[in-house]
Amino acid sequence: MRQSLGHVLASAACLVLFFFLGTWLQQYLFHSVPAAVLGMLSLFLLLLILGEIPVWLESGVQLWLRHFSLFLLPPTVGVIVLWPTIRTHAAAYGLTLVVAVLVPLFVGGWLFQYLGRR
């Protein structure tokens, strides 16, 4: 499927508008949920209501997905720049990552089993 410049710009504008909607929702209704999550959830709900993905959105997003790795460059550069600090606190970062993964994993598993028995 060939992407036109109009589809790419329209899909980018759509994503930005839903991000702003998520920001508004976060500011006035759901303070503890990140704006990006609220925006993507809003877009998902709209697409569920529509029952299909509009052609202009699907073809525009295909280009974004094909070059998604470019969005990971800024965090990678940040890790490279801050590597001396990260290396000095590697044990704390490692422990934080392990706890942040294992605690929700075990609590979620326990909750799933608990609710499954009820």
Image (tube, rainbow, N blue to C red):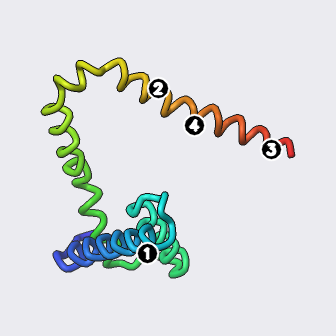
Please state if 18 lies on the left or on the right of 5 as rendered: right
Asked if the residues shown at circle 2 and circle 4 are in contact, with their CB atoms under 8 angstroms apart, the answer is no
- Can you say whether 77 is above or below 71 in the image? above
Q: Which residue is mark 3?
A: 116
Asked if the residues shown at circle 1 and circle 2 are in contact, with their CB atoms under 8 angstroms apart, the answer is no
Q: Which mark is residue 98?
A: 2
Which residue is drawn at the image coordinates 46% and 26% (left, top)?
Answer: 98
Where residue 39 appears, x then y in whole percent? 41, 68
Between residues 67 and 105, which one lies in front from this camera angle?
105
SS class, disc 4: helix
Where residue 26 appears, x then y in whole percent? 44, 67
Between residues 116 and 98, which one lies in front from this camera angle?
98
Please state if 100 lies on the left or on the right of 11 as rendered: right
Mark 3 residue crowding within 10 angstroms, few (<14) / some (14–19) / many (20+): few
Whole-Å distance between the Cαs marked 1 and 2? 38 Å
- Pick whichever of labels 4 and 3 is earlier in the sequence: 4
Which residue is drawn at the image coordinates 16% and 75% (left, top)?
Answer: 5
Image depth: mark 1 or mark 3 in front: 3
Which residue is drawn at the image coordinates 20% and 33% (left, top)?
Answer: 79
Whole-Å distance between the Cαs marked 1 and 4? 33 Å
Q: Residue at the left extreme?
A: 81
SS class, disc 2: helix
The amino acid beneath tag 3 is Gly
Image depth: mark 3 or mark 2 in front: 2
Asked if the residues shown at circle 3 and circle 2 are in contact, with their CB atoms under 8 angstroms apart, the answer is no
Q: Which residue is mark 4?
A: 104
The amino acid beneath tag 2 is Val
Between residues 59 and 71, which one lies in front from this camera angle?
71
Q: Which mark is residue 53?
A: 1
Looking at the figure, which quarter contains the N terminus? bottom left
